Amino acid sequence: MGKVLELEQREQAGSGSYNRFEYQVHWIVCHIIGQLENNAECIVFCEFHDDMAEFIPEKEEYQFYQIKTKEDSSDWTVAELSKREKKKSGGYKKSFLGFIYYNFLNFGVECSHCYFISNNDYDKDVRLWQSYIEDGKIVAVENNELYQRIKGRIKDEYVDSLPSNFDRVFDIFIQNTFVHKSKLQLSTYTTQTSGMFFDQLANKNIPTDTAHLIFQQLVNDVRKKSTEQIKTPISFKSLVDKKGIEISKINDKINSTISKKGNYTDFYKYLSTQGLTDKELHCIESAKTLHDSRWLNVNDFKYQEIVITLRKVISTYIECMGDFYDASVLEKECMHELLKQGLSSQSLDRTLIEVLYYEQRFSKEI
C-alpha cells in the first residue's frame, strides 16, 4: 500500500464558499471532459489530499491539483502563492505552494507533478518560472535569484521542522509544479462547462435530452464525491468507490447509451412508423429541435421544471393507456398538472407534449 493511501489527509473541509466549491466542481468536470476526449486511462479523485488528484494506473503515479479563485483581476505573485494565513487556533496554515511542496515531501515517487489552477493570470516572475520548466530548463541555473526567493519562502514555512531532505525535495518541487490559468470564468463557468461537454459529444449523435442527463449525473457525481468523508489507511478499491471517477467507465457509459438510446436518425425513422402525416412529422421535428436547444440551456430553470413535470404526466399516461393515444386528453392532463404546480407557460403548446410523448414511446421500443 502506497503512502497516498496511508497518510491522513491534511484537511477535508473543501472550498470555503458555495461559489468556490461549485467552481471547483465544474473545473474537475471540465478536466474529465478533456480526458474523455483523449481517451485517457486514469482515475480522478475529488478532494483527496488536494482539491483533485489524478491517478495514472500505467505509471502508478498521482498528480495533485489545487483549484483556487480570486474575485479581483490581479495577477498571482510568488508572494501571494506563498502567503500564509493565520489559524483561528493560533499558528499558521501552509501556503498554496507550501501545501504543494508537502505532496512531494510526503508522497515521494508516487507524486509526479502538482498543479495550481486559478481563474486569474500570473505575474512576470511566476511566468518566468513556468517558462523554464516547460522548456525543460533548470530554474536554479536559468534564474538563481528567483530560485532562491521561492526556496526561501518555502523554507520559512518548514523552519520549525525542517526535513533533512529539504533541498532535494525542493528541487523536485520547483521543476514539477505547474501553474495554469483556467478557461472558466467566475460568471459563466456553469454554461462554459456544459458547452464543453456537449461539444465533446457532438459527433456521437446522442439525443440532447440524454446527453443532458449524462452531464447532470457527472456534475452531481463530482459534487457527491467531493464532499464524501473518508479515513485513511484505505484500500484503493474503497477509495475509487468513495472518491473516484474512472474515465474509461464514463466512456463506456456514453457508448452504451448510444447503443441503447439510438440517435436522431433512429428517432425520426420511428416517427415515420406512427401514421403521422408529412405536416405532423415536420412539426414534431421542428419542435424537437427547439426543445433540445432550450433543454440544454441550464439557466432556463422554469423550462427544465416544465419538461420534468410533463414527462411524469406522460409516463403515467403511457402506463395506463398503453398504445392508445388521445392528444387532446393528454394535453388536458398536462395542462392541469402544470397549473397545479404553478408552472403554466404561454410558450407551451401541444407539439412539445407530442415530442415528449414520442420520445418516451421510442425509448421503450429500443
Image: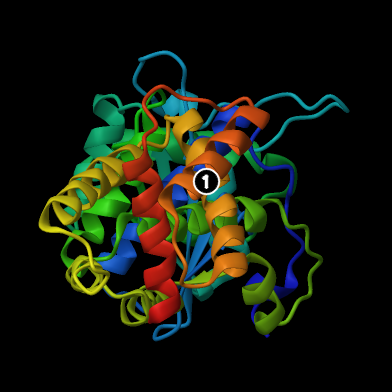
Q: Which residue is depicted at the point 45% across and 55% down? A: 326
| Image colouring | rainbow
* Quadrant of the rendering where the C terminus is positioned: bottom left
Q: Quadrant of residue 238?
A: bottom right
Front position in the image: 32 or 13: 32
Q: Is residue 119 visible?
A: no
Q: How many marks?
A: 1
User: On the rendered structure, is 136 left or right of 94?
Assistant: left
Residue pointed to by mark 1 = 310
Front position in the image: 229 or 10: 229
Q: Is residue 211 visible?
A: yes
- Percent position of residue 234, x then y: 76, 76
User: On the rendered structure, is 333 left or right of 284?
Assistant: right
Q: Quadrant of residue 359?
A: bottom left
User: On the rendered structure, is 234 left or right of 197?
Assistant: right
* Quadrant of the rendering where the N terminus is positioned: bottom right
Q: Which residue is depicted at the point 27% across and 65% down? A: 206
- Residue closest to the far left: 278
Give the amino acid type for the residue marked by disc 1 in the picture: Leu
Local secondary structure at mark 1? helix
- Percent position of residue 273, x then y: 23, 74
User: On the rendered structure, is 327 left or right of 329?
Assistant: left
Front position in the image: 9 or 159: 9
